[in-house]
Amino acid sequence: MSILIENISKKFGHFQALSPLSLDINEGEMIGLLGPSGSGKTTLLRIIAGLEGADTGRIQFGDRDVTNLHVRDRRVGFVFQNYALFRHMTVADNVAFGLEVLPRKERPSATEIQKRVQHLLEMVQLEHLASRFPSQLSGGQKQRIALARALATQPEVLLLDEPFGALDAKVRKELRRWLRGLHDELGFTSVFVTHDQEEALELSDRVVVMSNGHIEQIDQPGALYASPNSRFVFDFLGNANVFEGKVANGKWHNQQASIVLPHSVIEQESTEQKDGQLYIRSHEFFVSKEPTAQANLPLRLIAINPIGAEVRLELTPIDWQSNDVWEIDLPHKAFDKNCFEKGQTLYVSPKAAYFFAHDAQQPVLLNWEASKV
Amino acid sequence: MATHLSAADTRPRHKRVLPGLSLSLGTSLLFISLILLLPMAGLVMQSVDMGWDRYWQVITDERVVASYKVTLWAAALASIFNGFFGLLLAWVLVRYDFPGRRILDALVDLPFALPTAVAGITLATLYAQNGWYGEILESLGIKVAYTPWGIVLAMAFTSIPFVVRTVQPVLEELSPEEEEAGMTLGASDWSVFRRVIFPALWPALMTGIALSFTRSLGEFGAVIFIAGNMPYVSEITSLMIFVSLQEFDFPAASAIASVVLMASLILLFAINIWQARYLRRLHGRS
């Protein structure tokens, strides 16, 4: 079922939790609401569910206007962050709850309910736990039971609030894949809230990035990664180092450090030659022990962390300003060849960067490698 | 002592990190013995002195048995009433914010703070035939003061805080998510209460009712002023103890008292065992 959100806003006291925002969700889509805490993503999810009322605006499920419909009549499946399983009921009773409370006319017979519960438990691969109580389950098991319970009434919309937040990394990955499979198989429309960019990018058809109660960007994961449209999205999607530069003599300067403007910018003369910030992703670097013709960015190596396929270097600026520690990812091969050591002074040159001029909202993609040719 | 100071013995000898176990536990046990166990033992000793036949004769005396019935019935009615009303009061105090909520919250403890005799006299005055409430009830043909209903009223009044104060904290800690989960699954308000909230409150409510019941069994001060104290009709067991004492028949008084004591103890243990089982299931320590 498609979901239409139009001009929804919400205030808690004086706090504007959501500025009027609109969002169109297609039938069968999986949408990730991504943002830091306090960005309004959970509030938006709860408004879609009907657990919270919006101050303004309209919500429509398919052709059905549900703006003023009570949560129990909206027929959505909702999975809570802490699972909210009924503690005094067995797993089977938990899953059966949605069917047991149906009005007498619509309620399936007791044997039918039992069959459906059995089927749902098989679907989440936990049929052997039917007579356990929630307190006897692990986090991942609780999460799957919560999902089975939400799906028992066959809702066309499934809403999940930080579904994997409280689980360890391995279980989280497993469940993510499993949820995606389930979504593709059953074809419901789902919206989930997360603050984990990796989760959002991996799981969603489209990601909605939120901050301070409004939507920053809506895009498919690939497009979002390739062209973040604001500083916030860039910061939040992470792994970017920021170089604050002032233009002079074809270079961006920051105290003793400098980066040469790429050809594409020099050719454009004045239009792009502005002061601003360069956002450089952690893997878009060339690292050497001497400055290059293209950049003079001296950094001190303070930590070396091998992470999966790459080695992450943490560096602090020498004689220039940056708010954060710089992180640079190198392939193991490149790292092993160079034998870098902690405490060493290294020089890095960006291969590509996104440039935000001080007066611009939209970034410009810069590329040094292409210009070398 | 000197031998203990060898190097090997300087490491901490206690496994527990928190200090003071032996001191605090010892003090507690001493006090429990002094103020609880010793008097109870004295009570039993008094009754043992009188011999089994005499003991049995005293506790099965017709008038005393009638008082058991009155006390049990009245206490049962009072605690069941408190179960309903106390739950309602706790619900209102926890769930809603209204002007005067804090005052109401403080007033709940009044029956604990008020001397029971004062409560008894006040209730008797209010519900007497010419009292404020009594007059109205009289016109409806209902008599409360100086009847067994008066006993129920006095018992309910003095023991209502037990229910409110046991249910209140549990209600406060109930997670709103479980209720919301119930609602997203389509349950009506009543279904959510019956299937989600009530099962969580049930153990606390039962404990509250049981405490209220045991307290009512032993209530004396508030009851005697309003009960009328007619033999076989509105005499409570505590009064029978008092009457025996006034006749300087101490063994008889302790014999009757031991019956009340046994009843209360059995009830308290039973409710504790039941509650432990129920909670174990909830918290998964089985």
Image: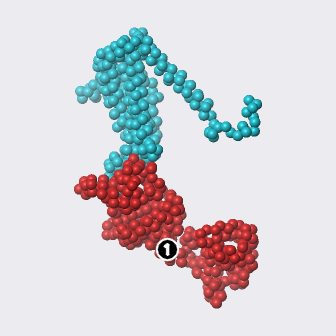
Q: How is the image coloured?
A: by chain
The residue that mark 1 highlights is A221
Q: Which chain is cyan?
A: B
Quarter occupied by the N terminus of chain B? top right
Quarter occupied by the C terminus of chain B? top left
Name the residue rendered at 53%, 26% in the picture: B32
Name the residue rendered at 56%, 25% in the picture: B30
A20 vs A371, left or right, is: left
Q: Give the quarter of the image for residue B140.
A: top left
Name the residue rendered at 41%, 11% in the picture: B50
| Relative height, residue A359 to residue B247 (above, below) | below
Give the mark count: 1
Secondary element at image label 1: helix
Q: Where residue A220 appears, x then y in whole percent? A: 47, 75
Q: Is residue B157 visible?
A: no
| Mark 1 residue type | Pro
B185 vs A360, left or right, is: left
Q: Which chain is red?
A: A
Q: Is residue B111 visible?
A: yes
Check the residue under mark 1 and report the chain it is in.
A
Q: Where residue A20 appears, x then y in whole percent? A: 45, 67
Name the residue rendered at 35%, 20% in the picture: B236
Q: Mark 1 packing: few (<14 Cα in 10 Å), some, or many (20+)?
A: many
Q: Where residue B102 appears, x then y in whole percent? A: 46, 40
Q: Where residue B177 appears, x then y in whole percent? A: 43, 53
